[in-house]
Image: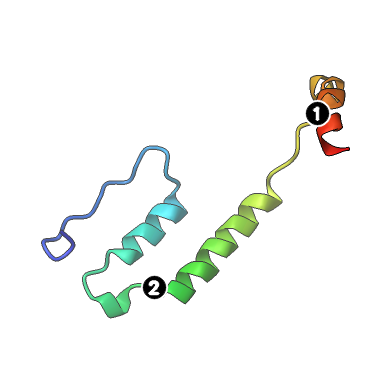
């Protein structure tokens, strides 16, 4: 499909950075595509960026139900 010029359209739930990475993997010349090592680095960096903007939301209902699962860990 790549050799025939087909490229998947950007899914509606896909961010621009992820789609750009997908497109780089679909380059016609295999030597122009990112290597596995490149992908590990790029995806790790993307995950690190996501983690920096993620916060834990602890509500009172979570704390009230903590005793119900605590026994499993004792």
Q: Quadrant of residue 63?
A: top right
* Depicted 54 relative to depicted 6: above or below: above
Residue labelled with disc 2: 34
Residue labelled with disc 1: 69
Instruction: Determine the CA span between mark 2 and mark 1.
Output: 45 Å
Query: Secondary structure under badge 1?
Result: helix
Q: Quadrant of residue 4?
A: bottom left
Q: Is residue 14 left or right of residue 49?
A: left
| Display coloring | rainbow
Measured as percent of width and height from the top left, residue 12 is found at: 37, 37
- Label 2 Cα crowd, 10 Å radius (few <14 / some 14-19 / many 20+): some
Q: Residue at x 54, y 70 (%)?
A: 41
Q: Identify which residue, 62 or 41, lies in the foreground.
A: 62
Q: Identify which residue, 1 or 16, lies in the foreground.
A: 1
- Which label number is shown at residue 4? none
Q: Residue at x 84, y 21 (%)?
A: 60
Query: Secondary structure under badge 2?
Result: loop
| Closer to the eye: label 2 or 1 | 1
Q: Residue at x 42, y 38 (%)?
A: 13
The mark nearer the N terminus, 2 or 1, is: 2
Q: Is residue 3 left or right of residue 42?
A: left
Say which quadrant the N terminus sits in: bottom left
């Amino acid at each position: 499909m790549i050799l025939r010029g087909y490229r998947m359209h950007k899914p509606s739930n896909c961010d621009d950075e992820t789609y750009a990475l997908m497109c780089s993997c679909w380059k016609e010349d295999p030597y122009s595509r990112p290597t596995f090592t490149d992908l590990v680095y790029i995806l790790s960096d993307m995950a690190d960026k996501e983690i920096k903007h993620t916060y834990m939301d602890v509500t009172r209902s979570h704390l009230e139900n903590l005793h119900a699962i605590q026994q499993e860990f004792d």
